[in-house]
Amino acid sequence: MDAQTEKMRGFFDRCAGGWDVSRRGDPRKIAALVTLAGVRKGSRVLDIACGTGVLFPEILSRDPALLLGVDLSGRMIEKARSKFHDPRLRLAALDFFNVRESGFDTAFLFCAYPHFPDKARLCEQMAAVLKPGGRMMVAHDMGRGAVNRCHGGEAVGRLSWALRPVREEAARFSGRFRIDMAADTGEIYFFSGVKKQQST
């Protein structure tokens, strides 16, 4: 684990205890995002940087075959494990770039995108874990300005990178994904697309 990744892991380990008090997702927006992502009965879903599981109730309500939650922070995973007991859910304290499982129908990255500095590498790894035609969703349940203010403090700022306008961020993924949905308003920020078939 490189020094930057280790700093990131340590930061979120320290935050895990109070995370559910300080950061609560908006249930209506989460439901809308899960609906837009097309999660349905029997889906295989990956929640990247899942934290303590803010997306889990909504995703599990759609009856997936598997929900895999991965997070760099072991403390976040411990907290999630204490809250959820569902045979469809599997949790792993793991760097997303070390995930080798593939064939997922949907991959979510919710409220964590600013903590991934290498967007090209992120795009490639998201494509690697998804099946052809699988959908990725990068999303925040608040607007870009609010996200950037949250990540502008001294401690967090060293471990996160500001969101750019959604068209610019989505363009970084257009080589591997057909981007078909995006929003950049004062209330929500997301982009989503399906994995392209590789040409032969």
Image (cartoon, rainbow, N blue to C red):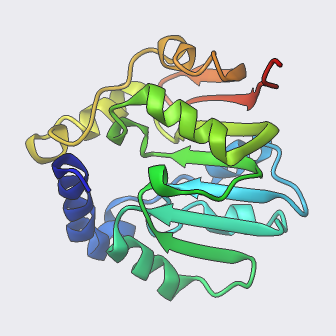
At which x and y percent is residue 50? 50, 60
User: Which of these two is toward me, 198 or 32?
Assistant: 198
- Residue under the point 19% across and 45% down: 156
Res 1 seen here: yes
Pinpoint residue 15: horizontal percent, then vertical percent. 25, 66
Question: Which quadrant holds residue 72?
Answer: bottom left
- The residue depicted at 11 percent of the width and 47 percent of the height is 155
Extreme residue toward the front, this view: 200
Q: Residue furthest left?
A: 154
Q: Which residue shows up at 63% across the image and 16% down it?
A: 175
> In the picture, residue 112 is in which quadrant?
top left
Total number of numbered discs in the rendering:
0
- At a point 59% along the width and 82% down the height, the residue shown is 84
Q: The C terminus lies in which quarter of the figure?
A: top right
Res. 143 in view: no
Q: Quadrant of the N terminus?
A: bottom left
Q: Is residue 164 left or right of residue 180?
A: left
Would you identify the image quadrant in which residue 198 lies? top right
- Residue 55 at x, y percent in the picture: 60, 60
Relative to 11, 164 lies left or right: right
Residue 98 drawn at (x, y percent): 47, 56
In the image, residue 138 above or below residue 13: above
- When the figure is inspected, residue 163 is found, relative to residue 23, above or below; the finding is above
Viewer-proximal residue among 145 and 169? 169
